[in-house]
Image (cartoon, grey):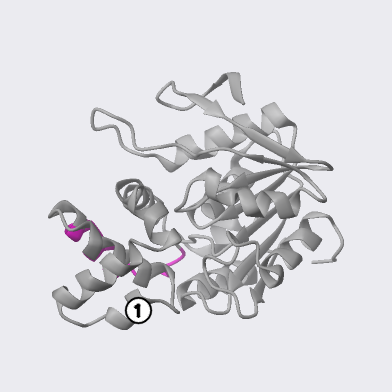
Amino acid sequence: MIVEGLRRADGSPVDVVTSGSGPGLVLVHGARPAADLARLADRLGQRFTVHRYDREEVGGGGARYAVADDVALLGAVLAHTCARLVLGHGLGGLVALLATGALLERCIDRVAVYDAVLPIDGSIPEEALEQAARALATGAPDLALAHLDRHLRTSSLGRTAAGRSQRVQRLVGGVLARTEWGRSTTARLPQVLAETRAGLQLDSPADVYAGLPARALLLTGERSPEHFGAAAREMAACVPSATALVAGGCGHDSLLRAARRCVQPLEAFLAGDTLF
């Protein structure tokens, strides 16, 4: 539903899709759009009223993506829905955590993130991202997709292509482009790279999050790239209100598939069923 009065930084309207019943929960997507969270929303809708929307986008006319605009948009969605729970994935996890600490209304009771982009003391390797950006700039989206896949996922073709010839990597990118993940991500490659670069500019020591005013669960996948887990552990060590956990057997896309071992701890935490 297009919400009257709810606008992005560029003035475009925001479509908030609501389903389920129970306490209000806002989903903040990562590299893939809100539509790809439908399976997750259905699963969580058994216990929560789930709201999903598309985050800020790279604007026209050369306008740049700004994380601060995304934080403000999440605040506006929370105010509209009156939800007090947030679940973020990837860069959406960073937006969720920043909003929890920044919104003066203290309107978030619990925030959960999965494989959040947490730029803490250079914790996020940038090589694959820069390679993807260069490939995209030179008109090679298949090669860019292979590099981005290597950055996000460990059990993937992109990882096996690392260090191989550019021809091999482009072949791998072509195969990935025909997968569900590849089709959805290819369409958003410029957006994903722009917003990830913007997020990395917020690199800081973990203790800047020490005063986080809400309980936080930092969940990462056992099969996700190690930089997600390392940053989560470092942040949890400095933030009394945060707990870092690992979802066994799960990878970066497991949340989108609503895999039980990924969703179960998030669901329990957000419902207040656990002490952490």
Whether residue 131 is in magenta: the answer is yes
The image shows residue 55, relative to residue 172, as above or below, that is above
Quickly name the residue at label 1. Answer: 159
The image shows residue 63, relative to residue 188, as above or below, that is above
Magenta residues, as a range?
120-135
Residue 249, how many percent across, how many down?
Answer: 61, 80
* Most distant residue in the front direction: 178
Residue at image coords 57%, 79%: 222
Q: Amino acid at mark 1?
A: Arg
Residue 143, how many percent across, how many down?
Answer: 22, 65
How many numbered marks does the figure carry? 1
Residue at image coords 76%, 48%: 45
Looking at the rendering, in which quadrant would you find the C terminus? bottom right
Residue 201, how many percent across, how many down?
Answer: 36, 53
Looking at the rendering, in which quadrant would you find the N terminus? top right
In the rendered view, does 124 fall on the left or right side of 83?
A: left
Residue 30, how many percent across, how many down?
Answer: 49, 52
Q: Kindly tell me whether residue 104 is visible in this rendering.
A: no
In the rendered view, does 238 fall on the left or right side of 110?
A: left
Q: Residues within 10 Å of mark 1 (few under 14, many from 20)?
A: some
Q: Kindly tell me whether residue 28 is visible in this rendering.
A: yes
Name the quadrant containing residue 128: bottom left
Whether residue 273 is in magenta: the answer is no
Residue at image coords 45%, 59%: 180
* Most distant residue in the top direction: 4
Name the quadrant containing residue 4: top right
